[in-house]
Image (cartoon, rainbow, N blue to C red):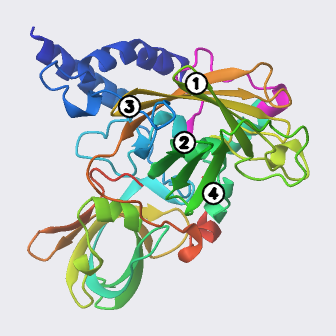
Amino acid sequence: MTLRLLCNFVYSFALLLLMAPPSLAHHSFAAEYDANKPVTLKGMIARVEWTNPHIRFYIDVKNPGGKTARWEISGPSVNALARNGAKKDSLKIGETVTVEGFLAREVKNLANMKTVKSADGKILLDRIGDQQ
Amino acid sequence: MTGRLRTAILLLLPLLEACSAKSPAAATNPSAGVSRTADGKPDLSGIWEMKKDRPCPPGGCTDNQVVNQFFDIGAGLSGGLPYQPWAKQLVQQRMELNGKDDPSSRCIPGGLVKLHTNPFRRKIIQSPGILVILFERDATYRQIYTDGRPLPSEVDLTSFNGVSAGTWDGDTLVVQSVGFKQGDTEKDGAWLDRNGSPLTGAAKITERFRRVDHGNLEVTLTVDDPKAYTAPWTIKLNQVLVTDGQELLDYNCTENEQDAVHLVGK
């Protein structure tokens, strides 16, 4: 076994050990969101707050009955997104997006994002490599 | 974290260190020599961030890529932190509630120790007589006087970061700090980590800053707080030089804080 293979094995094992519940620098992720309740939402962006400690945006999601419900989506800090290549206009009002994330424990229609994709599948925002 | 899991991670650490070491050919600029200031001291100036030691799971991080010490400041210490009984009970309670009462959730400054472990960047500006650290987090600062002034015997106006004075021990800057803010009781001081490890107003913190090479800063931090811990304890906080050319960015927690009212714990 080469050193590289051994190192890859060590990394993989360490990753499995270190898959702890996520946490935000500003507040505890687990105190607000449920990592066991993933959610996928498709809706039109109605409002964007490109602010710290977290960006927030709001999407209008049509439910199967045809009614529209407004969802609040919380994301990383502006600092983390800026260093991940995102810009203030990465999210455009009126654009239809698909959000993957996690539901809030108690508050209705609130989720924490993992990724945001455009209608053609392009990643607009993501947490991969996120730092804050 | 279970005892077995903690042991497995501790056993893996040397292997991970060996695997992450650069080959001689790759070890170029970041590990070059340390420049010195006009007074001959090692120059600690630069933009730094914590060395990330908590890899993202397969598929990427669902959240922050912060260091283990952000969650447990005693991570890596054999046996964990030497809590006084009341402090141990308090930390258990705080952990059961997933850290929902962390003062940071309400945008209260985290204090000296959290300024080291949070994922935001910090900039050291060194000059003869003073070393200043600017922090993105809450756009705050520390002033470490190296002009020979002693620490005050008593601090009337306590603060989140305390009062600091530094002296050089060879190429290591030794910084001592006292005067940390505490509320009405010993339980109402700063949280040192997300688990809620407490710091009381009686604490004295010693940091030993050593620029190992051009790209690495080692901070050895000792907390001596007999009210909360049965013995002083020491940890290492490894920081790396930021080389992407990006300056500090303001991060003001109060700008649009809306989460505090949604924290339910579990």
Query: Is B132 above or below relative to B21?
Result: below
Mark toward the start of the polypeptide (2 vs 1): 2
The residue beneath circle 3 is: B216
The Cα atoms of the two marked residues, 3 and 1, are separated by 16 Å
Query: Is A43 above or below relative to B121?
Result: below
Please provide percent x and percent y for residue B27.
20, 25
Closer to us: A49 or A121: A49
The residue beneath circle 1 is: B235
The Cα atoms of the two marked residues, 2 and 1, are separated by 12 Å
Q: Nearer the viewer, mark 1 or mark 4?
A: 1
Q: Is residue B78 magenta?
A: yes
Q: Nearer the viewer, mark 3 or mark 1?
A: 3
Residue range (magenta) = B71-87
Please provide percent x and percent y for residue B224.
76, 27
Mark 1 is on which residue type? Ile
User: Are marks 3 and 4 in one subunit?
Assistant: yes
What secondary structure characterizes most of the magenta part? loop
Q: In the rendered view, does A128 fall on the left or right side of B175?
A: left
Please tell me the numbered disc located at residue B116. 2
**Parent chain of label 3:** B
The residue beneath circle 4 is: B104
Residue A58 seen: yes
Mark toward the start of the polypeptide (1 vs 4): 4
Q: Nearer the viewer, mark 4 or mark 2?
A: 2
